[in-house]
Image (cartoon, rainbow, N blue to C red):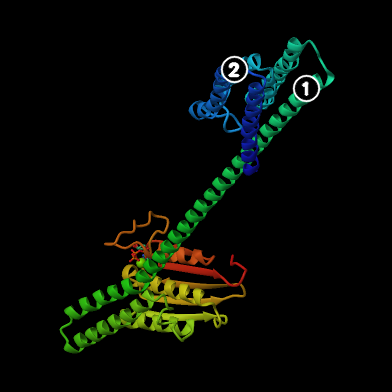
Amino acid sequence: MQHALRSLRVLQHAVFAALVAICASRAWAIGVHPGVLLGVTVPLVACYAAGPLLARRFGAGPSGWVPAGTVGVLWLLALTGCWIASVIVAPDHVWLAFSLWLLAGQVLSFGWAIAYAAAALAIVVLHPWSETGHLTTAGVLGPSLGAVFAVVVSRGQMALVSEVLERQKLVQSLVRAQQEADSLHTELADAQRRAGALSERARLARDIHDTLAQGFSSIVLLSRAGSEADDPVRLRDSLQRIGQTAGDNLLEARRVVAALTPSDLAGSSLVAALTRVVDRFADETGLHTELHLDGEPGGLPTTIEVALLRTAQGALANVRRHARASRADVSLSVLADSVRLDIVDDGIGFDPAAAPPVPDPAHGGYGLPSTRARLRELGGGLEIESAPGQGTAISAWLPLGTGSAP
Ligand SMILES: Nc1ncnc2c1ncn2[C@@H]1O[C@H](COP(=O)(O)OP(=O)(O)OP(=O)(O)O)[C@@H](O)[C@H]1O
Ligand SMILES: [Mg+2]
């Protein structure tokens, strides 16, 4: 469409140039003095040529090359003045009215364009009549048709221009919408990347807390016991346990980094892993500790097995550090649509409703919140029943399949 508009513009200039050439040669032929002819033709052409320059300087109308607004109107009036002067010199110059009608449709509003066309038509029709005294039908009809045709063509051109502008606006808004969609997409991808990084960070933090931190705390306790032992046999036993715990944790550290399942679970069932954890706990603390089973725990998804194992490790670490208990019981119950793990001790208990310790690297406080978060991510939850002097019962539950536990 842009191409069609450009062609129309070129055609309009060509028509003007051709009419000027024809009119000048006819004026020459009827003996108009060359100086006079030049005197009217040069200003006419110069004024026409000033149109694009004025449009560039003061702003163009919709057609893109005629000046807009008041400047456009003044330019058209100046051009009309030059034309009238040329008509006075050589009557055949009335033919140039065709170009002026085309311009009127581009510079003026529709109403004013009609009025202008009528006025110019009056000059075109009446001037030869005043000269010759004859008024023929062809002399009236021809210019009238020319005026109507020129105004209609230029209005059509304007309609075409406004359609092109509308399309350009539409394309621009589509491009903007596309750019916004692209930037939203990028933001979304960034947010997803950040969320992925955060969730990986949370996984590492939990795994480090439930495995390495507990291992280091065991080593601290064992080394304290060893340094207090006078008996070389007990000392050697402590050192062996320290070595064993450090070795286990080294292995666990590698598995955490590689995001592998815990070593206790690797290649074995949840029950076997829990048995190992409970036995080790009893061995290291000397507490009476038992594992109870209810239901068939085979075939649980690995994510659930890992969460339950970590819950048991975290809860037993709390028993060891805080409970001052004489016994601890771990119970795994597998129901039709959920699985539950309880860790109960008969220690000093605590008030779960009291303000929880603010997590900090020196004193901890990460354990229970991170266990709860881990279970919630899998659609489950954590319940704590405890009171000072009455022991503690930690109960974790997870839904199996699509069902959820009460
Ligand atoms: N079995 C328990 N017996 C007595 N108190 C407990 C028991 N379990 C937890 N608590 C209390 O709950 C608090 C919070 O436990 P949590 O596991 O969140 O943190 P932490 O054990 O203090 O530190 P971290 O686990 O980060 O090393 C503990 O400081 C302790 O006071
Ligand atoms: Mg803890």
Does ligand 1 reach within 8 Å of label 2's beta carbon? no
Label 1 environment density (alpha carbons within 10 Å; few <14, some 14–19, many ≥20): some
* Mark nearer the N terminus (1 vs 2): 2
Q: Residue at x 66, y 38 (%)?
A: 163
Q: Is residue 379 left or right of residue 154?
A: left
Q: Which residue is identified by label 2?
A: 33
Q: Position of residue 23 (x, y in %)?
A: 66, 25
Question: Observer-nearest residue: 201 or 122?
Answer: 122
Residue at 63% in and 34% down: 14
- Residue extending farthest to the bottom is 233
Q: Is residue 17 above or below residue 249?
A: above
Q: Mark 2: which secondary structure?
A: loop
Residue 277 in percent (x, y) is at: 39, 80
Which image quadrant: the C terminus? bottom right
Q: Amino acid at mark 2?
A: His
Q: Position of residue 132 (x, y in %)?
A: 76, 12
From what the image shows, is residue 124 above or below residue 385? above
Amino acid found under the numbered disc labelled 1: Ser
Q: Quadrant of ligand 2?
A: bottom left
Please state which of residues 307 and 138 is positioned toward the viewer in this rendering: 138
Please tell me which residue lies in front, 328 or 278.
278
Residue at image location 46% in from the left, 66% down from the top = 374
Q: Residue furthest left?
A: 230
Q: Residues within 10 Å of mark 2 (few under 14, many from 20)?
A: few
- Residue that carries the numbered disc 1 in the rendered image: 144
CB atoms of marks 1 and 2 within 8 Å:
no
Q: Nearer the viewer, residue 327 or 333?
A: 333
Dot 1 falls on a residue whose secondary structure is helix
